Amino acid sequence: MDNLVLEEWNKNSYRDFINYLFQIQDLKYRDFHKSLVLNSKYELIGIRVPVLRKIALEISKGDYSSFFNNICNKYYEEIMIQGFIISRIKNEEEFYKYFKNYINSIDNWALCDSFCASLKIVRKYESKYFNIAKDLSLSNEEFISRIGLIMILNHFINKDNLNDIYLILNKIKSDKFYINMAEAWLVCELYIKFPKETKKFISKNNLNRFTQNKAISKINDSYRINEEEKKSLKEYRK
């Protein structure tokens, strides 16, 4: 497809777009990535993330609202491109309209993490989106909760938010794998940035055994933590 910057998308141009995605697919990457996003409802074409970001950038220069209106939500790459376009929207009201609907499309960790990492706009409206992230984190839905946690991890770890973040982690009562892994990753990042405060949290919290031990393992795997500190955390394994 020669031009992705369209004044208006329709069924025909969107069909051409899907055909274009298949023309640039990488079958080896598709087969590899398929093993990483098990149980997703979307079909995988096989296109690397940097390429998807470039495609999203081009589409966002045109009438992306009509692009959204024609999405068939069949392919994994469609969903990721949609997320990257939304993340580039500069008008906060418009961004929020798409954001709150889009998050219900996310059904695997890769879509979640790529989207959340791209949301630079939420830092400009920290009060609003930190509260949204906290609420999402407490959802019983596995990937809605993960979205909240990964938003916090990428955008809201700072001194003023520490107590609220620890409180949220203590409130989560879930044994769902992708929630617990996000919690563990978040605890690791908190420890890297605020070791004294987070060590106190690690010493006494409501995390389940898997999450607590996975968090300590992630800290032990980090090159940003010295060996003495890593050794001192072993006593907090559950």
Image (cartoon, helix red, strand yellow):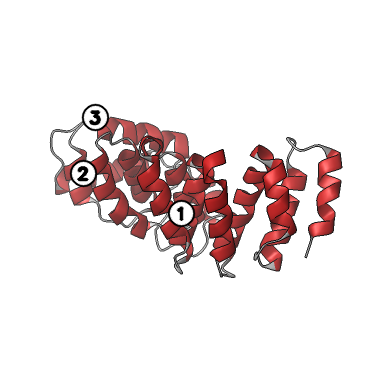
- Helix, strand or loop at mark 2: helix
Between 202 and 24, which is closer to the camera in this rendering? 202
Q: Residue 7: which quarter of the image?
A: top left
Note whether 50 is above or below 187 in the view shown: above
Under mark 2, the amino acid is Phe
Disc sitting over residue 61 in the figure: 3
Instruction: Tell me: 86 left or right of 157.
Output: left
What amino acid type is highlighted by mark number 1?
Answer: Gly
How far apart are the two marked residues, 3 and 1, measured between alpha carbons? Answer: 28 Å
Q: Residue at x 69, y 65 (%)?
A: 210
Count of numbered labels shown in the rendering: 3
Residue sitting nearer the eye, 115 or 187: 187
In primary-sequence order, the first of circles 3 and 1 is 3
Q: For the residue labelled by badge 1, is the local secondary structure a helix, a strand or a loop?
A: helix
Neighbourhood count class around disc 2 (C-alpha, 10 Å): few under 14, some 14–19, many 20 upward: many
Q: Which residue is mark 2?
A: 67
Q: Classify residue 53 by image quadrant.
A: top left
Label 1: few (<14), some or many (≥20) within 10 Å?
many
- Where residue 204 appears, as percent x and y from the top left, is 71, 60
**Residue at the disc numbered 1:** 148
| Dot label at residue 8 | none
Front position among marks 3 and 1: 1
Q: Secondary structure at mark 3?
A: loop
Marks 2 and 3 sit apart, C-alpha to C-alpha, by 11 Å
Q: Quadrant of residue 207?
A: bottom right
The answer to whether residue 2 is left or right of residue 214 is left
The mark lying in front, picked from 2 and 1, is 1
Residue 30 makes an appearance in the image: no
Residue ID at (73%, 46%): 219
